[in-house]
């Protein structure tokens, strides 16, 4: 899920108005249980920096997405699509500097099972990267598309939601990335909720911790179906191995807001 970038920053505004046109519905779910309730959510937002697993992939991230979920025969089923447009830095070594506008589309699906003492899940993610060169000479090397299968365990303890997920890259190589997450919500009022979370990334092949990222969001539900969520996040780079992407990555602070509508 790495990105490209552009020198022509004023073209970024054109990407801000791109809309996501991905509809992800598995007809087999409805065929097996026509009465199954399907929950859906669309969301859109802006973040000053594209922070992915503790790595700074670019700036001015404008995103939109669609998620659907249901239950069938005791299984939780979900799928979705995410689109992001952002400015990524021109790779080092090229005779130009700055950034250029690029984009990414992610498609994903998951099957989960509540086992009582914990919830287990397996999922799939397809990362589709834009190869637009924006007229750079020579153009940046295209970032390859990627596919991941992930395995996750989740459990709530003392009001805190914990999760452990291992991402297995089946197309390129992400060094066997694993992530330990924890989150907790505080209801401040019937329409205001404070959400806190943290994630610790671990590189299995290198045998070292990559990053620690903490996030705080304030959800304001201004209607029964619509929520606006300003947020801030900070990531600390903990990797020092020059064989990893974290070796030259510093600490990152990001801020943004998200609008979500459920139906």
Image (cartoon, rainbow, N blue to C red):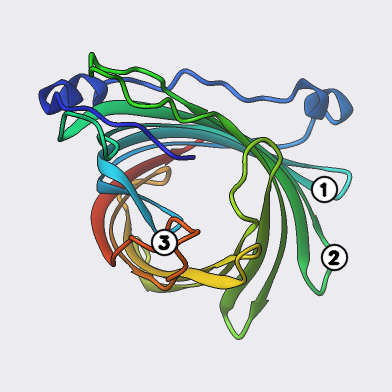
Residues marked 3 and 2 touching at CB (< 8 Å) = no
Q: Residues within 10 Å of mark 2 (few under 14, many from 20)?
A: few
Q: Quadrant of residue 211?
A: bottom left
Query: Horizontal placement of 1 versus 136: left or right?
Result: right
Q: Residue at x 39, y 35 (%)?
A: 3
Lower position in the chain sequence, tag 3 or tag 2: 2
Say which label, 1 or 2, has the lower sequence index: 1
* Rendered residue at 27%/62% (across/down): 252
Q: Which residue is mark 2?
A: 115
Estimate the x, y position of residue 162 in percent, counting from the top left. Answer: 61, 73
Q: Nearer the viewer, mark 3 or mark 2?
A: 3
- What residue sits 40% from the left and 60% below the top? 54
* Numbered circle sitting on residue 92: none
Q: Callout 2: helix, strand or loop?
A: loop
Q: Which is nearer the eye, 192 or 42?
A: 42
In the depicted view, which residue is nearer to us: 195 or 204?
204
- Which residue lies under the disc numbered 1? 75
Q: From the viewer's perspective, is residue 140 above or below residue 156?
A: above
- The answer to whether residue 104 is visible is yes
Q: Earlier in the sequence, mark 3 or mark 1?
A: 1
Front residue of 160/96: it is 96
Q: Are marks 1 and 2 in contact (CB under 8 Å)?
A: no
x and y percentages locating residue 44 in the rendered image: 35, 36
Q: Nearer the viewer, mark 3 or mark 1?
A: 3
| Distance from the alpha carbon under mark 1 to that under mark 2 | 10 Å
- Judging from the image, what secondary structure is the residue with disc 3 in? loop
Q: What residue sits right under mark 3 in the picture?
A: 246
Is 118 displayed left or right of 22 in the figure?
right
For disc 3, the neighbor class at 10 Å (few under 14, some 14 to 19, many from 20) is many
């Amino acid at each position: 899920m790495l990105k490209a970038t552009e020198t022509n920053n004023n073209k970024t505004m054109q990407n801000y108005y791109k809309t996501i046109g991905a509809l992800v519905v598995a007809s087999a779910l409805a065929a097996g249980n026509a009465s199954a309730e399907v929950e859906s959510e669309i969301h859109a937002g802006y973040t000053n920096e594209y922070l992915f697993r503790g790595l700074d992939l670019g700036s001015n991230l404008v995103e939109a997405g669609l998620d659907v979920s249901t239950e069938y025969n005791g299984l939780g089923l979900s799928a979705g699509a995410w689109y992001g447009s952002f400015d990524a830095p021109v790779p080092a070594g090229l005779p130009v500097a700055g950034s250029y506008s690029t984009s990414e589309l992610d498609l994903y699906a998951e099957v989960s099972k509540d086992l009582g003492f914990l919830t287990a899940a397996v999922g799939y993610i397809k990362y589709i990267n834009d190869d637009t060169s924006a007229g750079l000479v020579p153009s940046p090397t295209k970032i390859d598309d990627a596919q991941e299968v992930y395995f996750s365990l989740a459990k709530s303890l003392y009001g805190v939601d914990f999760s452990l997920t291992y991402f297995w890259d089946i197309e390129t190589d992400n060094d066997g990335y694993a992530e330990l997450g924890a989150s907790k919500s505080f209801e401040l009022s019937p329409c205001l909720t404070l959400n806190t979370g943290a994630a610790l990334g671990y590189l299995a092949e290198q045998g070292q911790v990559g990053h620690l990222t903490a996030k705080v969001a304030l959800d304001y539900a201004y209607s029964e179906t619509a929520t606006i969520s300003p947020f801030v996040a900070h990531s600390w780079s903990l990797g020092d191995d020059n064989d990893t992407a974290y070796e030259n990555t510093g600490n990152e602070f990001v801020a943004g807001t998200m609008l979500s509508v459920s139906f």
